[in-house]
Amino acid sequence: CGTRSAEGNVPGMPRAESLLRELVGRGLSGSFSSQLELAATLFGQLAAAVRRPELYVARAHPGGQGQQAHLHLWLMSAEGTLAKLDNELHAFVLMSGTLSPLPTTIAELGPTFQSRTLTPVAANHVVGQESLRVVTVPQQSPSASSKLECTFHAWKRLPFLLSIGHALLKIVQAIPAGILIFLPSYDLLERCLEAWQKTEDDGQLLSCEPRRKGKGKGGKNRSAGTKRRYRGAVERVPDEAPEATIAGRSIMDDLRAAKGTIVVEPPPMCQNGATVARVYEAAKERYEQAVQQSGQAALLAVYRGRMSEGVSFDDDFARGVVCIG
């Protein structure tokens, strides 16, 4: 339908797109009209990709042997969209609380946006420096022999998960009102919850089986009674005994004693968007009501999850934020 000229124009494709949209506008109805609209959109996207091929990634699958042919076209830069709006908009206002660092954001939006950018207006943080304190917790206690380094191998070991729990308990007991606790993923959140619900009386927590000399994978000695357990891509192998807890109590018991209500962010579910939104909203409301009614609660959530993006926890709802990992 068209070829790219030396100037980068594609005369045939825009005409084809205009013709198809004109046919749609003449009152055609039903599936035929929808197909024409899709075809017009396809021609428009192909023309844009030919004009600015550096902004797109295209991949074609010819099909055959019972498989349908597919054409995939991905726009990899905001420049492809903003360049189209350059002549149509008098102003473009971009507002968000997570644009920093601004030079990087402006550069990622492309040269069109960069050429029209005025001096950014940035407000001060809502929390003053005198009310904010950032603390790094390198180990559970000064006497602890191991550091709280969240490496891939560390997440495999039950004692490490328990050490994280004991350190978290001390932090939670020192911070009043509501506290937010974030972990790297839903899988690791589930692992921590499983470990923190164990007690000293739980046989899985403190195994008393003697170690027998035996060759494991890679020629390393491993207890014959130690059972490998898998969840997802991470292998968890219990190691040395963790710090003892009060007999009959788990870390979760102590967390509830310190904060009353412990709310856990629901994991993604294979349901429609409306149902998922209601589940998340119910969890958020439960946390907020607990803080309002009892003056304290804790929310366990995940980075880049629904509870960490686009949700505002003010005042007593976030007197402390713990970032693990």
Image (cartoon, grey):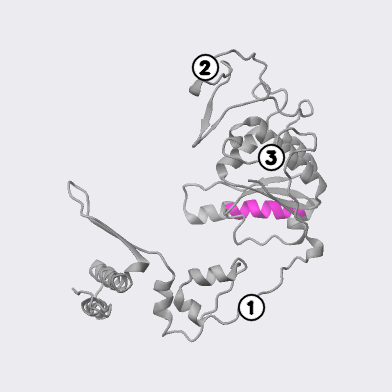
Pointer 3 residue:
148
Percent from the top left, x then y, of residue 191? 60, 36
Q: Are marks 2 and 3 in contact (CB under 8 Å)?
A: no
- Kindly indicate whether the residue at mark 3 contacts the one at mark 1 (C-beta within 8 angstroms): no
Residue that protrudes farthest toward the front in the picture: 219
- Give the residue at mark 2: 215
Residue 98: which disc? none
Which label sits in the foreground, 1 or 3?
3
Q: Do we see residue 117 in this rendering?
A: yes
Q: Residue at x 30, y 74 (%)?
A: 51
Position of 121 with respect to 317 (left or right) is left
Q: Position of residue 138 (x, y in %)?
A: 72, 43
Q: Amino acid at mark 3?
A: Leu
Quarter holding residue 4? bottom left
Could you tell me if residue 196 is visible in this image? no
Secondary structure type for disc 1:
loop
Q: Is residue 299 above or below residue 209?
A: below
Amino acid type of the residue tagged 1 in the rendering: Val
User: Is residue 186 shown left or right of residue 250?
Assistant: left
Q: Residue at x 24, y 71 (%)?
A: 36
Task: Report helix, strand or loop for mark 2.
Answer: loop
**For residue 121, which numbered disc appears in the image?**
1
Q: CA distance from mark 1 to mark 3?
A: 39 Å
Q: What residue span does the magenta drawing correspond to?
A: 280-291
Magenta stretch prevailing secondary structure: helix
Query: Quick one: label 1 or label 3, which is nearer the N terminus?
Result: 1
